Image: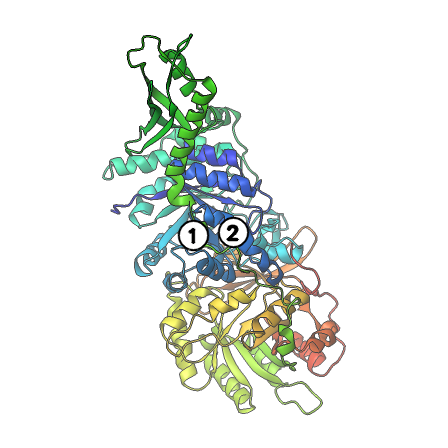
Amino acid sequence: MNMKKVELLAPAGGYETMVGAFNAGADAVYLGGSKFGARAYADNFDEAQVLDAISYAHLHHKKIYMTVNTLVKEREFSEMYDFMLPYAEKNLDGVIVQDLGVMKFLRDEFPNVEVHASTQQTVTGVYGAKLLKELGCCRVVPARELSLSEMKAIREKANIEVEAFIHGAMCYCYSGACLFSSMVGTRSGNRGRCAQPCRLPYKTAGSNGKEEYPISLKDMCTIDLIPELIGAGIDSFKIEGRMKKPEYAAGVTSLYRKYIDLYYKEPDKEHRVSKEDMDILKALYLRTGISDGYYHRHNGREMVTVSSPAYNGTSEEVSKMIKEKYLGYEKKIKCDIYCDLTAGSTAKLTMLLKDNSGVVCEITGKEVQTASNRPMDAQNIEKQLRKLGNTPFEADDVVVSIDDNGAGCGIFIPVSELNEYRRSLCDKMLEMLLDSGDAKEKAYDRSADKNTGSAESSDNHLKIQKRKADIHVLISSKEQLGATLGYLEGDSHKKKIERIYVDSKLLLGEEKDSVLKDLKTAADAGTEVIAALPYVTREEKIDGTLDIITLINVCKAGNLCGLLVRNLEQLGYLRDNNYLGKVICDYGVYVWNAESYKLLSECTKGDFSVDEISVPYELTIHEAKDVTVAVKSFCDVPVTYNIYGHVPMMISAGCVKKTTDRCSGKTGSVHSEKMHMIDRMGNDMTVTTDCRNCYNVVWNTDPTVLLGKMKTIDDMGIFDHYRIDFTIESGNDTRDFLESFINDKTFEKKNYTTGHYKRGVE
């Protein structure tokens, strides 16, 4: 058993919630400031409230973590230093981060503040966690989808702190990989504005035409698993819910506190959660039904609120009980005050804390005078000294010692002077208690310009040579490959396909020999061939890293030039194994700003390095230009821009087929099936299974097509490659699009979107 006790971490959407959570037993809270937090619709804290929160927490030996866990656009990055500076100077305990650029920036500029990798970074294994540790993180919040054994492996093998969700709402998609809300509107989950399309009804083949809720997960409740979670070495238990009411945060915190303490008191005894306590948890704003999350299962219908995702609401009786017990008051620090008033000597006041810390504070005042008429009595002096009102302190014993040195007339001290001594004593004690955390101004240079200017406002773009982009095509089926091979040879009047990305399942399944033969044909025609790794790599029942080894061996055999990397786990694995082929980061290794690429460029090890990057789907063409120009101003790394494809809106460990019908029974096999979900507007979304890695992809109904924008994009001359992604298209659809694009023919598909080309995310 760990000697260090697990941290209980509660959410705080506002100051009252924070105080209530601490009153209920939280060791730390996480909160959002006025910018860059992934809960844009929570109350959130303004700057003064955050600073007050840090002081309050530190006085009571608690911690504050701030969520700076959105992706940050190039033009916004200049605001980061001024935003963070006051909190760093106040000794903020940690920052929870998604954006790699923000992570680098905080690590370099504010080294006293811990950096924690958000669950939005989609850490699914040991290699991603090790990579983040080497890049400056001291803690990771892994993907919620991981099993307990995977969490334990990260803790032990990556030797990094692990913070895990134990209670509250669950996303259906791997966090950070969800573009659903973004693609159907402008509210991005990566920007804290998710519209929660997973909570809406859909029709599927298995629902007999009825609307159901196949992608809405039940809320998590793991209070029964506390001994197991502690035994696995998890460092911090995280309660979800910054959007929820103070009663929720305090009530849930109090019950987890109770059973955590019971465990540590008697670790060998089984502490069953009482029916009364479970009823209280269920009465605190939980969706219909609860599950214990993914800790003991990969997925399952029992995790989904198929019939309704509605909330039960909070019981008024429970709410009233929690309010009375935990809300509406701030804890005070108990102290004793000693006041020595001796005529002819300076007044002396001493404060002693009663928390066994032994902290003592003393002040001296003016010389004490003998009284000329009405002497001060000890009772009135004590009354004044007890008026600690708005201070963090509360006096137990107040001992007043009066000595007129034998004059027989007593002493006199003005009440105003006494009040001033009391205030000075409290201020000095407060300063002593917070000194180790507050006096940080010397650590940071306020005068230096730490801001990264936007690409548009710099002259850096003048250094960038204009270029003409070549064409890359990603294929996901044998039919798509066959259709693509017909367009490899281009004459002087036609565009030529310079690179083919082939989905890894084609190189691992039964068709691999035939596929490799076709790819050799492509290579002989001068086309580069890259394997596209899966969207998720885990070491669960099937060790996904073994497939990467297989693909590396195919590379060594001369058939592949490199790998398209989809996540940090794959990047970390390749780095650890000194992979020497070409490494291209896909859109999901997010580069929204130049600082993100700077961090990726640090991922070198031996001869390993990141060779190319891709523009994320959620950036407008102008934002894509901003980040590309900013990156190329210091490093001419090749940049890919996607011009066609159905956007993968969700990557989920859940399985729509298993929930609405039945499992294929082919988990671990190279096998894929298609299903359909139809929303309330009649949009038909294809859902594909990846049975090898056991995940679903929900694809956007219409493909993103930028054919009509190509002149504008070409004229910019800033991208090195254009990518065309074929995923759920038939061979004929693949042929039709290539014919339109390569031979400049009219694209006749009626329904398509231009994605975020002009329609930016909030």
Q: Is residue 643 above or below residue 247?
A: below
Q: Earlier in the sequence, mark 2 or mark 1?
A: 2
Residue for badge 2: 84
Q: Amino acid at mark 1?
A: Val
Q: Nearer the viewer, residue 726 or 75?
A: 75
Label 1 Cα neighbours within 10 Å, binned few <14 / some 14-19 / many ≥20:
some
Q: Residue at x 40, y 44 (%)?
A: 437
Q: Nearer the viewer, residue 21 or 263?
A: 21
Q: Are marks 2 and 1 in contact (CB under 8 Å)?
A: yes
Q: Is residue 454 above or below residue 412?
A: below
Residue for badge 1: 113
Q: Residue at x 64, y 58 (%)?
A: 183
> Which mark, by number, is residue 240?
none
Find residue 560 and report its horizontal and vertical position in percent. 47, 82
Helix, strand or loop at mark 2: helix
Find residue 601 and report its horizontal and vertical position in percent. 47, 71
Label 2 Cα neighbours within 10 Å, binned few <14 / some 14-19 / many ≥20:
some
**Cα distance, mark 2 to mark 1?**
10 Å
Find residue 397 and report its horizontal and vertical position in percent. 33, 20
Q: Is residue 669 visible?
A: no
Q: Residue at x 62, y 73 (%)?
A: 460
Q: Is residue 431 visible?
A: yes
Q: Amino acid at mark 2?
A: Met
Colour scheme shown: rainbow
Find residue 725 and report its horizontal and vertical position in percent. 60, 72
